[in-house]
Image: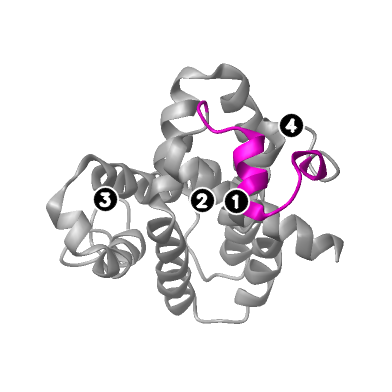
């Protein structure tokens, strides 16, 4: 019951934040959308910031990501990267209006930005780095700067999202294809052969 009610509140918050923006949205509106009293929200979330962090944590899939990455170690690396990007990019695009709200708010709200980095981004990067290091150890990925490679991969997805949110027609019309193109670039680069200076 507790988990179901929490999920109900988070779904409502996602809709309200996407429609109204973080600053203009109120917990009263979230409660109305969820069909509960405003006080009930505070049984589950400390404040509106905590509610937004929890919403982003769900969209980030932080809770399941470590398990997904652990299970993926038995998979073919190329298949994993493409499937992972397809999944994550589908989740992001389906919720792009929420990301629009959060990104715009974080650029001007230092408190929110610091909390998002600490509670969502940093734990995710740690999970990604650990998985990457293990793949290098197993000989499934080439040795590189793991911290920067993890962030560059995440930045490529974020960059595509920003272009889509800005109205880039190519990205908007072909988002479903972007994961395949991106995984190919990440795994094989842009060179015709593997004989470049970084090979």
Q: Which residue is mark 2?
A: 15
Mark 3 or 1, closer to the camera? 1
First in sequence: mark 3 vs mark 2: 2
Q: Secondary structure at mark 1?
A: helix
Q: Is residue 128 visible?
A: no
Relative to 21, say whether 111 is above or below.
above
19 relative to 63 in the view: left or right: left
Q: CA distance from mark 3 to mark 2?
A: 48 Å
Q: CA distance from mark 3 to mark 4?
A: 52 Å
First in sequence: mark 4 vs mark 2: 2
- Does the CB distance between marks 4 and 1 fall below 8 Å? no
Q: Secondary structure at mark 2?
A: helix
Mark 1 or 2, closer to the camera? 1
Q: CA distance from mark 4 to mark 2?
A: 17 Å
- The answer to which quarter of the image holds residue 95 is bottom left
Q: Decide which of 160, 149 is in the foreground and name it.
A: 160
Q: CA distance from mark 1 to mark 2?
A: 8 Å
Q: Which residue is mark 1?
A: 33
First in sequence: mark 3 vs mark 4: 4
Q: CA distance from mark 4 to mark 1?
A: 17 Å
Q: Decide which of 80, 65 is in the foreground and name it.
A: 65
Residue occupying the point 51% across, 51% down: 15
Mark 3 or 4, closer to the camera? 4
Q: Which residue is mark 3?
A: 197
The overriding secondary structure of the stretch rendered in magenta is helix
Residue occupying the point 69% across, 59% down: 8
Q: CA distance from mark 3 to mark 1?
A: 56 Å
């Amino acid at each position: 019951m507790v988990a179901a009610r929490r999920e109900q509140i988070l779904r409502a918050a996602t809709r309200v934040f996407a429609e109204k923006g973080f600053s203009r949205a109120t917990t009263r509106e979230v409660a109305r959308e969820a069909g509960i009293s405003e006080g009930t929200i505070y049984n589950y979330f400390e404040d509106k910031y905590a509610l937004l962090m929890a919403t982003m944590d769900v969209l980030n899939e932080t809770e399941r990501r470590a398990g997904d990455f652990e299970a993926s170690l038995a998979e073919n690396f190329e298949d994993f990267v493409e499937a992972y990007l397809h999944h994550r990019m589908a989740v992001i695009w389906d919720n792009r209006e929420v990301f629009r709200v959060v990104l715009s708010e974080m650029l001007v709200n230092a408190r929110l930005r610091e909390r998002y980095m600490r509670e969502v981004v940093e734990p995710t990067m740690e999970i990604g780095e650990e998985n990457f290091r293990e793949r290098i150890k197993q000989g499934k990925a080439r040795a590189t700067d793991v911290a920067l490679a993890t962030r560059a991969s995440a930045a490529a997805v974020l960059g595509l999202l920003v272009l889509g949110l800005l109205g880039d027609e190519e990205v908007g019309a072909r988002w479903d294809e972007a994961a395949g193109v991106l995984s190919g670039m990440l795994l094989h680069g842009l060179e015709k052969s593997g004989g470049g200076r970084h090979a």
